[in-house]
Image (tube, rainbow, N blue to C red):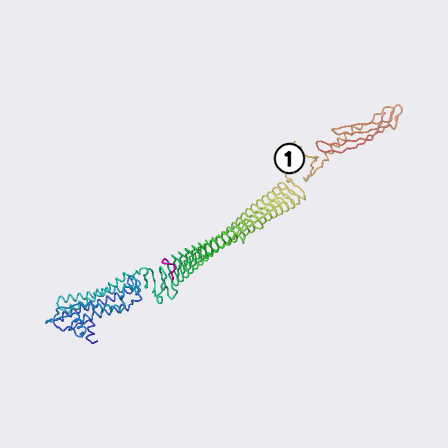
């Protein structure tokens, strides 16, 4: 191109008519200013509307910044060349001049003025050229139906704005020049004005056609990111050409491919109601949804959301990376959560509900059987219908319940509630309630901090209560019951032995059947009994009743304040009573007096059975019995009186030398028989006148057996004899 052509391209006018120079110079300045404004406007459009503007629309992949700049630059250069070279006498534009003259069919009169011209051909030339520029730069495409070139309406917004602003600027320049030409009646201004007007009009038409194309395209309003489109009943984020695209996902009512970057295609194969979103995401049934890389929803109305999530079953829901819901109505929420079973529910990272109706809520919780429930971090419920609630709890048995930090219910129907509570080491129906409570036997019960029921049917209630070795019962603080049927109730008590009982505070019962009741009593030995305060019974059958009593030895008994029986079978009764030997009974002390008003009562006497005996005592208070001796003496005395009555000597008269008599005697019921005899051994011992006879007498009697009614003693028969002598004168 020559220098003059270059000058034409830069917008300078060189007119051959000197008389118009001043006017043309002014018009040229106006045109240059308008074209400069057009250039600035295009730059503003390029920077604002194409690059983002207030709505932040990024440049679409197939309308680049370079394409937009090339379109604007070529339009400006083409219009400037037409305007500058539209006068046939302009230097350096001969070929263009002649083309314009031929197109306009200009007829020039003698005064060098244009009489008339035809603009239709010029209009067509300008339109074709502008369309060629728009097509070559990629700003506009002729094929309106090729919607694949423009995924959504906002995709064409930068081009539409650019075309609209360019048309307005060019038309404004043409209007000014046309006005100048009309005012001075010269074609030098009028023709350039027409060219600018026609160019601006055609650019405007391209803008209208672009706007019309936008109306046929769906809205991009689902996202503010570039590459968003909506077409064909589906929604696509990213380039769906399956070979090159930005990072994106595909959502559709049918089978859709092309989601993601370099990954497997998404697949929605369940029908028009299914949705698959993400690399390799797939749905295989009606109303299913899969969102995330390799997400899979294979059940009707199932939903899988998250990378590698899986929902398999009618109405199954898996939300979270690697979450899996397998089973009708199952639900899994959280990273790697797994719900495997009909209506199973898993909520939390690595939560696992494995069984129909199982529920696991909390990170790494596990519900491993039908109807089991695990709530809390690391909670575990593995038995049918078992329940575990709390941190690191474990319910292993069928129907078991574990609640509280580290609580464990290990047996069928077992219950453990409290921090570190343990119920049933394989034992059924055990109950442990309280911090570190332990119920390890079948049907055992432990309630309270550190309470322990260690054997079958054992019951321990209270802090540190222990029931062990059989169906023992310990109730209260630190009570210990050991042995079948042993009972310890109070604070604290210790009962060891079958049937041993300790009730109160600080009592000890050691031995089968031992009993300690009260305060700090001890019953040590089978059947030992200690009742009261600080009593002690040591020995088989030992009994201590009262305050400070002590019974030591087999069968020893101490009853009363500070009574003491320290020997085998000894008994101390009364305050201060003390035994000193085995088999002794001590009643009271030397400070005591004794009153027994009922001893002589008729009822008391009537109640006596058998021979009576008298009670004897010594100076030390030792009692004894005469064994009925006094009663026998009384009977014998009566028998003796009867014998005395019966032993009567025979009466000898003068001249009689011998005589015999038989006699009977009776005294207060005693009866006696006797045989008496007398014989003269000498006469006249004083002389014949004075006489003087000596006789010898003898009697033998028998007192019959006799029962004294008052003493209830029957005495044996008694024999009595008498020998005597007489001196008569």
- The x, y position of residue 387, in whole percent, is 48, 52
Q: Residue at x 64, y 33 (%)?
A: 598
Decide which of 719, 322 is in the foreground and name it.
Answer: 322
Decide: is 425 above or below 627: below
Decide which of 472, 620 is in the foreground and name it.
Answer: 472
Decide: is 181 above or below 557: below
Where, quadrant-wise, is the C terminus in this rendering? top right
Q: Secondary structure at mark 1?
A: loop
Quarter of the image for residue 613 reads top right
- The x, y position of residue 476, in whole percent, is 53, 47
Where, quadrant-wise, is the N terminus in this rendering? bottom left
Quarter of the image for residue 316 reads bottom left
Residue farthest toward the right in the current orientation of the protein: 688
- The x, y position of residue 340, in whole percent, is 45, 57
Decide: is 60 above or below 370: below
Decide: is 491 above or below 339: above
Magenta residues span: 267-273
Taking 297 as reference, is 447 left or right?
A: right
Disc 1 packing (10 Å; few <14; some 14–19; many ≥20): few
- The x, y position of residue 336, in whole percent, is 44, 59
Taking 535 as reference, is 695 left or right?
A: right
Decide which of 344, 286 is in the foreground and name it.
Answer: 286
Magenta part, dominant SS: loop
**Residue highlighted by disc 1:** 596
Taking 622 as reference, is 372 left or right?
A: left
């Amino acid at each position: 191109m020559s220098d003059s052509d270059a000058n034409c391209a830069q917008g300078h006018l060189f007119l051959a008519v000197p008389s118009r120079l001043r006017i043309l110079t002014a018009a040229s300045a106006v045109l240059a200013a308008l074209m400069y404004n057009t250039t600035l406007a295009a730059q503003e459009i390029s920077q604002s509307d194409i690059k983002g503007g207030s709505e932040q629309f990024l440049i679409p992949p197939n309308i680049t910044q370079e394409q937009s700049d090339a379109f604007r630059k070529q339009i400006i250069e083409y219009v400037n060349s037409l305007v500058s070279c539209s006068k046939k006498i302009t230097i350096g534009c001969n070929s263009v001049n002649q083309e314009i003259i031929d197109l306009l069919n200009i007829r020039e009169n003698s005064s060098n003025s244009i009489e008339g011209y035809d603009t239709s051909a010029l209009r067509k030339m300008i339109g074709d050229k502008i369309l060629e520029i728009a097509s070559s730069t990629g700003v506009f495409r002729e094929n309106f139906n090729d919607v694949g070139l423009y995924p959504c309406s906002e995709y064409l917004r930068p081009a539409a704005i650019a075309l609209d602003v360019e048309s307005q600027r060019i038309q404004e320049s043409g209007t000014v020049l046309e006005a100048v030409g009309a005012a001075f009646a010269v074609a030098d201004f009028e023709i350039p004005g027409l060219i600018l007007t026609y160019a601006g009009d055609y650019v405007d038409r391209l803008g209208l056609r672009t706007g019309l194309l936008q109306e046929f395209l769906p809205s991009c309003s689902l996202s503010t990111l570039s590459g968003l489109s909506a077409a064909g009943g589906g929604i696509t984020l990213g380039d769906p050409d399956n070979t090159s695209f930005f990072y994106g996902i595909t959502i559709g009512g049918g089978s859709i491919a092309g989601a993601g970057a370099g990954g497997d295609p998404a697949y929605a194969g369940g029908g028009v109601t299914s949705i698959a979103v993400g690399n390799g995401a797939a749905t295989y049934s009606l109303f299913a949804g899969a969102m995330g890389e390799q997400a899979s929803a294979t059940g009707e109305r199932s939903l899988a959301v998250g990378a590698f999530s899986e929902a398999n079953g009618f109405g199954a829901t898996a939300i979270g990376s690697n979450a899996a819901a397998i089973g009708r109505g199952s639900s899994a929420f959280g990273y790697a959560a797994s719900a495997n079973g009909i209506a199973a529910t898993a909520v939390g990272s690595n939560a696992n509900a494995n069984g129909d109706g199982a529920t696991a809520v909390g990170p790494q919780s596990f519900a491993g059987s039908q109807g089991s429930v695990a709530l809390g971090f690391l909670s575990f419920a593995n038995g049918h219908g078992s329940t575990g609630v709390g941190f690191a709890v474990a319910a292993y048995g069928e129907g078991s319940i574990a609640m509280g930090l580290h609580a464990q219910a290990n047996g069928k129907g077992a219950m453990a509630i409290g921090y570190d509570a343990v119920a049933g080491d394989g034992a059924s129906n055990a109950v442990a309630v309280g911090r570190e409570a332990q119920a390890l036997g079948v049907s055992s019960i432990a309630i309270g901090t550190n309470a322990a029921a260690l054997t079958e049917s054992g019951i321990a209630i209270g802090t540190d209560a222990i029931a062990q070795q059989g169906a023992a019962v310990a109730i209260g603080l630190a009570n210990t019951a050991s042995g079948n049927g042993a009972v310890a109730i109070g604070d604290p008590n210790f009962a060891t032995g079958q049937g041993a009982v300790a009730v109160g505070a600080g009592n000890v019962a050691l031995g089968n059947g031992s009993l300690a009741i009260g305060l700090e009593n001890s019953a040590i030995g089978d059947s030992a009994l200690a009742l009261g305060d600080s009593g002690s019974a040591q020995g088989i059958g030992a009994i201590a009743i009262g305050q400070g009593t002590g019974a030591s030895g087999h069968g020893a008994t101490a009853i009363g304040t500070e009574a003491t029986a320290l020997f085998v079978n000894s008994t101390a009764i009364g305050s201060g009573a003390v035994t000193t030997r085995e088999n002794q009974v001590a009643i009271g002390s030397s400070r005591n007096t004794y009153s027994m008003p009922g001893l002589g009562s008729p009822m008391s006497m009537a109640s006596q059975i058998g021979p009576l005996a008298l009670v004897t005592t010594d100076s030390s208070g030792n009692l004894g019995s005469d064994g009925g001796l006094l009663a026998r003496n009384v009977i014998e005395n009566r028998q003796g009186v009867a014998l005395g009555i019966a032993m009567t000597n025979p009466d000898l008269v003068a001249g009689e030398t011998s005589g015999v008599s038989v006699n009977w005697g009776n005294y207060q019921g005693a009866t006696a028989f006797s045989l008496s005899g007398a014989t003269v051994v000498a006469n006249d011992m004083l002389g014949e006148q004075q006489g003087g006879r000596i006789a010898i007498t003898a009697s033998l009697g028998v007192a019959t057996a006799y029962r004294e009614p008052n003493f209830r003693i029957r005495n044996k028969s008694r024999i009595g004899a008498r020998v005597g002598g007489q001196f008569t004168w």
